[in-house]
Image (cartoon, rainbow, N blue to C red):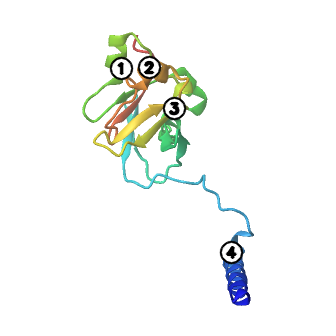
Amino acid sequence: MKKTVFKKILLAVAFNALCISLLTLNTGCKPRPTDNKTWTGDEQVYVTFGAQTVTISLHGMPLSTYNGIDGVKLSTIVIKANLAAKTELANYYFNFIATDAYDMSKMAIYWGKSLPTWNDMQKGYLYDSGSSYGLTIMWEDGTQEYAFDGGRFYNVHLMDGGTIQILEENVQ
């Protein structure tokens, strides 16, 4: 009886080793990259600078993970719009207008706060909240946006079809 159990275990181990060899044959036994995730939905946002507006489809854009949530970096969206030179983006401020007409600049004036800078945009994400809020913006801890009220003021919702404005001046 012990020989039969031993043979079954040995056969199972050999079978598993063969399966693993076949699965990794085309990859050279290297692990497959998991950081090449992209946005799969058909959501879009608009990016404006002056009188120019560009529609940006999120489909296929690279995802970054922050606090376990996958999202597209706001800076990636602005760069894709190509409305301002990458070297000049540090000179601008960024406003968000949601599809329900929430306008961050108006709230920034009311609260006496600054709009996000380019440095902040590199630490902000657009993600699918999975709720009625739809596409939502979140900020990394350490940004001015996160520091004020835990980011709630700056976490704009309903951004599918919303607008990111590039502004030459802050609104304060």
Which residue is at a point 28% across and 42% down the rendered structure image? 132
Q: Amino acid at mark 4?
A: Ile
Image coords of residue 34 (percent x, y) = 60, 55
Q: Are marks 3 and 2 in contact (CB under 8 Å)?
A: no
Image coords of residue 148 (percent x, y) = 44, 18
Q: Are marks 2 and 4 in contact (CB under 8 Å)?
A: no
Which residue in the protein does label 2 denote?
115
Q: Are marks 2 and 1 in contact (CB under 8 Å)?
A: yes
Is 151 situated above or below 8?
above
104 sits left or right of 94 in the view: left
Earlier residue among tags 3 and 2 = 3
Residue 98: image quadrant is top left
Which residue in the protein does label 4 denote?
20
Is 117 situated above or below 2?
above
- The quarter of the rendered structure image containing the C terminus is top left
* Label 2 element class: loop
Image coords of residue 81 (percent x, y) = 47, 40
* Label 4 element class: helix
Mark 2 surroundings: few (<14), some (14-19) or many (≥20) residues within 10 A: many
Earlier residue among tags 3 and 4 = 4
Which residue in the protein does label 3 denote?
84
Which residue in the protein does label 1 denote?
105
* Label 1 element class: helix
Q: Are marks 4 and 1 in contact (CB under 8 Å)?
A: no
